[in-house]
Amino acid sequence: MIKARIYIPSKSAMQSGRAHNDEWVLEFDTPTSQRPEPLMGWTQSDNTLSQLKLKFTSKEMAIKYAEEKGIIFTLIEPKPRKVKPRNYTDNFRYTPPKPTQKANPQPSEKKRETKKSKGQPKADKAAS
């Protein structure tokens, strides 16, 4: 039996909007893997269905087509989009940095000694 996936393709990195994002795609899963062709190094496959992508305007039409043709399909629903409402002024709003916790909050013994010795004059060895 032929297996396929039905999904809405994600937008490319070059797109910023959400227009033309309502097409459902039926893409066939290939049972054979693609491998490099020995002469030129291009990818080759014995199955030509791997090159075929059918586009539908609705999910129901894609499901109906797959059922009519006897195709076993997997339906991948799109994830809901999370929108954070923002104002234009939020781009320029100052947010203070969060305080960070140090791994060792207590100063080391060497730092304590140097802090104590800064205010005291050093004793000269030659004078004693």
Image: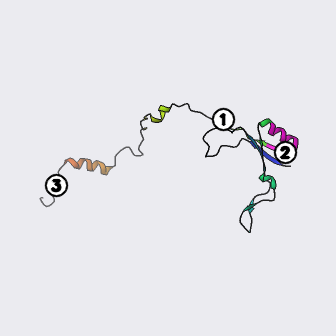
Mark 3 vs mark 2: give the one in front.
2
Q: Is residue 23 above or below residue 118?
A: above
Task: Give the residue furthest to the front.
Answer: 19
How far is mark 1 from mark 2, CA to CA? 27 Å
In the rendered image, residue 36 lying in the magenta stretch gets the answer no
Give the secondary structure at mark 3.
loop
Give the mark count: 3
Which tag, 1 or 2, sits closer to the chain's start? 2
Residue at the (74%, 65%) spot, across then down: 37
Which tag, 3 or 2, sits closer to the chain's start? 2
Counting from the top left corner in percent of width and height, residue 98 is at 43, 38
Mark 1 vs mark 3: give the one in front.
1
86 or 110: nearer the viewer: 86
66 or 111: nearer the viewer: 66
100 or 18: nearer the viewer: 18
Quadrant containing the C terminus is bottom left
Question: Taking 116 as reference, is 6 left or right?
Answer: right
Residue at the (79%, 46%) spot, across then down: 4
Name the residue that disc number 2 marks: 71
Residue at the (66%, 37%) spot, across then down: 19
Question: In the picture, residue 45 is in which quadrant?
Answer: bottom right
Q: Residues within 10 Å of mark 1 (few under 14, many from 20)?
A: few
Q: Looking at the picture, which amino acid does disc 2 mark?
A: Ile
Q: Main secondary structure of the magenta part?
A: helix
Q: Are marks 3 and 2 in contact (CB under 8 Å)?
A: no
Name the residue that disc number 3 marks: 123
Q: Are marks 1 and 2 in contact (CB under 8 Å)?
A: no
Give the secondary structure at mark 2.
loop
Counting from the top left corner in percent of width and height, residue 13 is at 61, 46
Report the span colored magenta: 61-73
Counting from the top left corner in percent of width and height, residue 54 is at 78, 45
In the rendered image, residue 71 lying in the magenta stretch gets the answer yes
